[in-house]
Amino acid sequence: MAGGTGSRLSPLTTMISKQLLPIYDKPMIYYPLSTLMLAGVNEVLIVTNQNDQSAFEKLLGDGSNLGIQIKYITQSEPKGIADGLLLGKQFVSNESFWFILGDNVFHGVGLGTQLREMHLPTGANIFTYEVADPSQYGVLMVDDQGSPIDIIEKPLNSVSNLAITGLYHFDNEAFQFAERVNSSSRGELEITDLLKIYMNNKRVFVHKLSRGTAWLDTGSTQMMHDASTYIRVLEERSGLKIGCLEEIALRNEWITPTELTRICSAKPINGYWNYLRSLCKEFG
């Protein structure tokens, strides 16, 4: 989900989508796309606004260089996250699907394997993360048995510290439920209201991200800076790249070392592409 106006980041987003802004050495959208690829997803629909679709296409193409399929659809107006979800109905067809926000960064050792091998019940699967300041997020309330009972948007008082992240897995009924969602006071179809329909049907399933997993929402300039610092420190200390789409494609065996060598041959000499050139030698 890479639509919207990115108003919280204005004037940075006056001429460019926030999902194309850098998080350290990569465009923001590389990180949520890498999460999907690590989870085994190789068919992706990117929802953009009308002004930015061509830029996304220039950046990612049709996905063939990554061994995946990428398609695009535009959101004519910023009508909310649930509206963006509805745009994927034809693409998804009758299947269940992953849904991720384009400004969310997830990182953790083994996270991809965990997502890929997770048993996901039929319904709405949400992923929560314990935060120190719940007032900045949509927060999940649970009963004594840990079952979800309500979602509170940016509560002034700390009713729960379980923030709902921008990663979801829905069954196909999400489209029928989303069509029943009414516009909020902001004039948007809210993902929270979709989740509440599932909750009323007792079909919301909660998965807590482990303490070894980092979740960063990059919707503000401070959060973007924090995420860039996090990525920079980890990459510099480990010598490994985070959110490197070509490396994930290679390790998933969606592309071969020969194909990656061909891709790198047309790229400039810099840290990102030199890292991938070293992988070509390692895997070659």
Image (cartoon, helix red, strand yellow):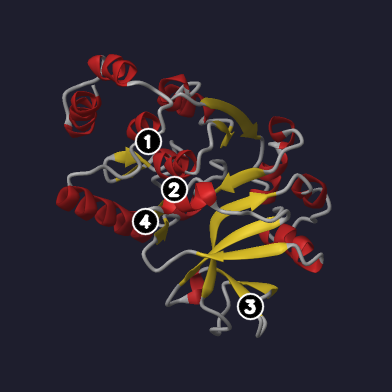
Q: Which residue is mark 1?
A: 248
Query: In the visual, does 180 lie left or right of 244?
Result: right
Query: In the visual, does 277 lie left or right of 193?
Result: left
Does the CB distance between marks 4 and 2 fall below 8 Å? no
Q: Which residue is mark 4?
A: 108
User: Mark 4, residues whose alpha carbon is within 10 Å: few (<14), some, or many (≥20)?
Assistant: some
Seen from the viewer's position, the closer of residues 230 and 184 is: 230
Precedes in sequence: disc 2 or disc 3: 2
Precedes in sequence: disc 3 or disc 1: 3
Distance CA(mark 4)–CA(mark 3): 24 Å
Does the CB distance between marks 2 and 1 fall below 8 Å? yes
User: Mark 3, residues whose alpha carbon is within 10 Å: few (<14), some, or many (≥20)?
Assistant: few
Q: Amino acid at mark 1?
A: Ile
In the rendered image, residue 113, in percent from the top left (x then y), is placed at 45, 49
Q: Residue at x 37, y 35 (%)?
A: 248
Residue 146's label in the rendered image is: 3
Precedes in sequence: disc 4 or disc 3: 4
Distance CA(mark 2)–CA(mark 3): 25 Å
Q: Which residue is mark 2?
A: 112
